[in-house]
Amino acid sequence: MSLDVEDLSQIELVDGPHSEPSGLVGYEMELRLNSSLFPPGMGGACHLFGMLAGDLLRFTLPPISLERWKVKAITFPEDWEVEEFNAFRGLNRANDVASIRAAFKLGPGMPLLAFSFKPRVGFDLKSLEDTALQVLLAGFNIVELDTRHLPLDRSMMMRLIELSARLPDKLQKHVGRLSINLSMRSDLAMEAAEMLCNVCPYPTVFKVDGGFNGLASVQSMRGRGLRDGRKCGPIITCYPLMQNALSQYFPGDQYLMRLAASGVDIVYPGGRPDVGRMVRSLEGAGEGNQVASVRRYRGLSQKGWPMLSIAGGIYPGQLQAFYELLGPNVAWFLGGGVALHKDGPRAGAELCVRIARDAVQKKMKAGKEWSEDISESLSEQADAMFQDRTLLSSDQLRYVSPRKHLSKVHGLDPCGY
């Protein structure tokens, strides 16, 4: 072998033995693997995660039997992470928050607004085009196909690409894009990504969800050095499918950060702050965890990439509260918060845009203090938008006031402008 055994791997007992409630004996170990076996530019992160979820910790060596395990932390050498960045994000292959804001020509303080198009059992493309155009004309920046909606065949993929190329021509006042879902076989995803970059006005935007194949597809796209007409590569949005499903093997935000380092630009990290009394919260932080959730979002944003988003059942009455806590560089991804407006999706989108603009103005005035409430007219419209459209009580969809509600939570502080 080219390496000595001790240079391949080492293991050290750092705690134990101790008794577990189940009666088993517990240990804590540190396993060190040679990073040269996982070269980043060759897909080393994918290989490592596959091993961790696969057979690396599944063994029996009589009289030892490993019954249960959990990976508490993964650390990578600094030079390994530099090599990973250079392979997939360096040379402007990917986008940081500043370049995303510039690409969409977002005004000072304005967050990026996106609509998640939800039908998961099929829809005709004319309905998609009509709805997407309404929402984009209302001032939204992205209309994105839901995680579970993929092209069913090559013909449909080509029609979605053609629609993505054509819709922006109908927008005169701002930058808006349709983001189709390329969470498919890697060679097809690469083919579609190249076509989108060739036929769409820039910025080109598409979605690749974060399963194992998605991680590999994003690395392939960034490794190929795709460009969309700017100096940067296309903007890739993502939902990290494996983030919590495999948390036993990938601790904390490790999978999320490997997706980001591999070239994902806009991502929902899960665990968003739960504000108000909304009962549906897709991987939100849960009641009582607002402070930790806000700190996590702010910590993940420190690098300047990727752009984080809030999603998972958010509604217009919460938007100023999210803006107050997380600031202008966290994107808003709404589904039912737009589509379920009693006057239709365009009215829902227009309401969100007006709330965003008012929240920005209030924040500019307040600086580092809690902002005043948005106008009474807007808060009343937000409270009334779901009338006769939901079985939830009106108390669960009320406007959340920064000064009345957020300021009372010990440890919360506003994001200064």
Image (spheres, grey):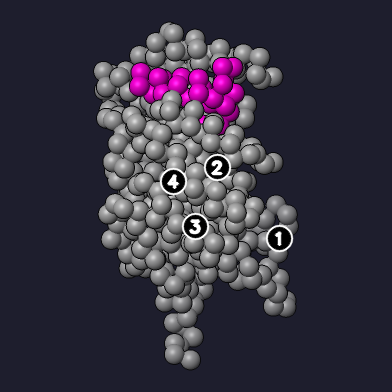
Question: Which amino acid is tagged 4?
Answer: Ala
The x, y position of residue 253, in whole percent, is 48, 51
- Whole-angstrom CA distance, mark 1 to mark 3, is 51 Å
Label number found at residue 165: 4
User: Label 1: which residue?
Assistant: 24
Q: Choose mark 1 or mark 4, whichever is in front.
A: 4
The x, y position of residue 236, in whole percent, is 43, 50
User: Label 2: which residue?
Assistant: 145
For residue 383, what is the image quadrant? top right
Q: Choose mark 4 or mark 2, whichever is in front.
A: 4
Can residue 231 be seen in this snapshot?
yes
Of all residues, the one furthest to the bottom in this rendering is 1
Question: Which amino acid is tagged 3?
Answer: Ala
User: Label 3: which residue?
Assistant: 192
Q: Residue visible at 48% across and 25% down?
A: 349
The x, y position of residue 319, in whole percent, is 45, 24
* Magenta residues (range): 332-359
- Whole-angstrom CA distance, mark 3 to mark 4, is 12 Å
Label number found at residue 82: none
Q: Choose mark 3 or mark 4, whichever is in front.
A: 4
Q: Earlier in the sequence, mark 1 or mark 4?
A: 1
